[in-house]
Image (cartoon, rainbow, N blue to C red):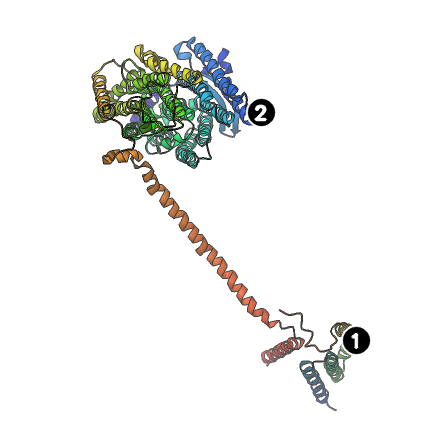
Amino acid sequence: MSPGHYVALAVILFVIGAVGVLVRRNALVIFMCIELMLNAVNLAFVGFARMHGQVDGQVAAFFVMVVAAAEVVVGLAILMAIFRARRSASVDDANLLKY
Amino acid sequence: MTNTLVAVAARAATVPTEVPLPAVGVQRAAWLLLVFPLAGAAVLLLGGRRTNKWGHVVGVAMPLAAFVYGVIAFVAMLGYPADQRSRELTLYTWIHVARFNVPVGLRLDQLSICFVLLITGVGSLIHIFAVGYMSHDPERRRFFGYMNLFVASMLLLVLADNYLALYVGWEGVGLTSYLLIGFWQYKPAAAVAAKKAFVVNRVGDLGMSIAIMLMFATFGSVTFSGVFGQVGHASQGVTTALGLLLLLGACGKSAQVPLQSWLLDAMEGPTPVSALIHAATMVTAGVYLIVRSGPIFDLSPNARLLVTIVGAVTLLFGAIISSAKDDIKKALAGSTMSQIGYMILAAGLGPNGYAFAIALLLAHGFFKAGLFLGAGSIKHEMNDEVDMRRFGGLRSVMPVTFVTFGVCYLAIIGVPPFSGFFAKDTVIDAAFDKGGASGWILGIAALIGAGITAFYMTRVMFMTFAGERRWDPDVHPHEVPPVMTSPMVLLAIGALGFGAFEIVGDRLVDFLGPVTGATPAEPGLFTTAGIVALILIAAGIALAWAMYGRRPVPAVAPHASPLTVAARKELYGNTVNESLLMRPGQWLTRLSVYFDNRGVDGLVNTVAATVGGTSGRARRAQTGFVRSYALSMFVGAVLLVGALLLVRI
């Protein structure tokens, strides 16, 4: 397996995630898509680290995982609060903060 | 170069360099002159309603006390030799900053004591008259408070030993005249007249204040001794400028053309106020200023010439207005303007005329106060009617008023041996003595003025006291009470004898000599000019008799010649002011307001509206949809990456 394959897989995963974020309305699905994008980036980090024989990329991947975990905790809490208040998990319904 | 020095030295030598001596003895208490009326004003104005009952007693007592002290100081002055009568009393240092040093002091000399006696003497008589005249006015206490303040301001004006303190009195007179002319401020006409007097006076005050600044800039001093001591070394331009600025100030206070318009409207005030303004205070201030500033005017023939021209124009101007006014007070007001014109004319003649200006001023103080008090008592009995076409036949019902008014009438038109004959003829003689074409023109103007004076005053007499009774049916005039007649009697005695007293034997001329400079040549009585004046006076009386004595006076003013119509409208003085000053001023303010609204505000408002409109449209981008925000972030990120790639390649 050449590094190009890893990068290609990472790009595919990232694009799937990005499209998911843009087109889906359900907040939970959007969260999962964001996770998909983050892990696509992790894959790219790890792939490049392996290619260059350095650990910097792998360390970065760990950082991303830690941040993603924290983000999920905060995000899910917000989502819970919104769902309780509005009985809906659709991001299009939560559009009060606007002009 | 040498010639210039000689010229400067020669000019400096002509200035009287009399240095006043410090006051001693009873004159050390000269500040009492200011304290008495000021205390009266303070008690009456700060005491409020609880002084209502006895306020007028204080109001009369204070000027009387000042008069008594004035007589004592005058007697003390007569005890000194003629060259030691000028005394100064330094009260305190008002301002002392670096080179600017203003000690406030009083100067008691022959000139100021004349004014002190006139102001307090005639002023006290007017105060006594006002006790009766204002007896039905609920605000009589406040009236006396203002009157006392008026007297105090005028005394400060004539007693100050420097121009800055004089200016304080000058402004005090302006303020109190405003308060008194507008005393019945609920009458719109009175309120407007007060405002007009104040505004017109401000124009003159401007000249005064600039003159004082110029004195300080040139001489580094504003005291009389400091300025007069150095004025001989000043350039011709500076002395002329000072003379013209002081003349502007004098024109404002003394109601001389072109600042005359306030005087007739000022008749809206209570009649004692008119008497006080016209006889003892206020309008005499301009004459005082010019005579006091004699050393400045002596050095500037151009300024003196303009002073005489202003005087000659005003004496004719006032006389013509007076000849057509049916309002008795306005007819008298026009005559004041005219008489003050004589004084200004005399003052403009320099050392030859100063003493005669003061002589006429003092004599005028008596007969004009008498005339105004007479007019006041008539108005009082005629239910505040002032139209002479509604008077007539008052001779028999108000005999005391008729006799006193008549004596003052004979005095003002200059019939011998009444005071106006002596005082006015000397002015006419002095004008002819000036020599040259200007002397002839001024003298002839003064002669014509004397003839017109006889006409309009006789007209007042006939319309008021003679003929049939043209009263309103509900008017029942009687003689006024003694509190009002006694001042009139005293003033009539003064009008009878004072002119002969001061002129015959050169009493006043010799007395004033050390202050007014060279003693003028002794005027002969019954000179050619004097006889011509008497003929003109007789002609004026005859004309007035033919028009108003022989024929009945119509109750409504008939159609008349264009000159009469113009005189009824005060020779269009107000029209000139309105079209030349007021309307352009209004246009200017309207233009400024337009420019402010449309120009300045327009620019600011346009910027604000543009920013507001743009942001109003831009905020529509904030839709509240998370996915649209995400899309814009993605697009941005893609563009950023794309740009980076593009730059690197």
The residue shown at (42%, 12%) is B84
* Tag 2 subunit: B
Q: Which percent across, then down, holds residue A75?
A: 76, 74
Q: Is residue B510 above or below residue A1?
A: above
Q: Which percent across, then down, holds residue A99?
A: 62, 69
Q: Which percent across, then down, holds residue B330?
A: 34, 29
Residue B288 can be seen in this image: no
* Tag 1 and tag 2, C-beta contact below 8 Å: no
Please, what is the three-letter code of the amino acid marked with disc 2? Arg
* Tag 1 subunit: A
Q: Check residue B188 in the rendering and tell me which mark sits there, or answer none.
A: none
Please, what is the three-letter code of the amino acid marked with disc 1? Ala
Q: Is residue B476 above or below residue B615?
A: above
Q: Secondary structure at mark 2?
A: helix
Viewer-closest of B202 and B180: B180
| Viewport quadrant of the N terminus of chain A | bottom right
Mark 1 vs mark 2, foreground winner is 2
Residue under label 2: B50
Viewer-closest of A73 and B489: B489
Q: Residues within 10 Å of mark 2 (few under 14, many from 20)?
A: few
Q: Check residue A69 in the rendering and tell me which mark sits there, or answer none.
A: 1
Marks 1 and 2 sit apart, C-alpha to C-alpha, by 90 Å
Specify the quadrant of the image occupied by residue B236: top left
Q: Is residue B625 above or below residue B192?
A: below
Q: Secondary structure at mark 1?
A: helix
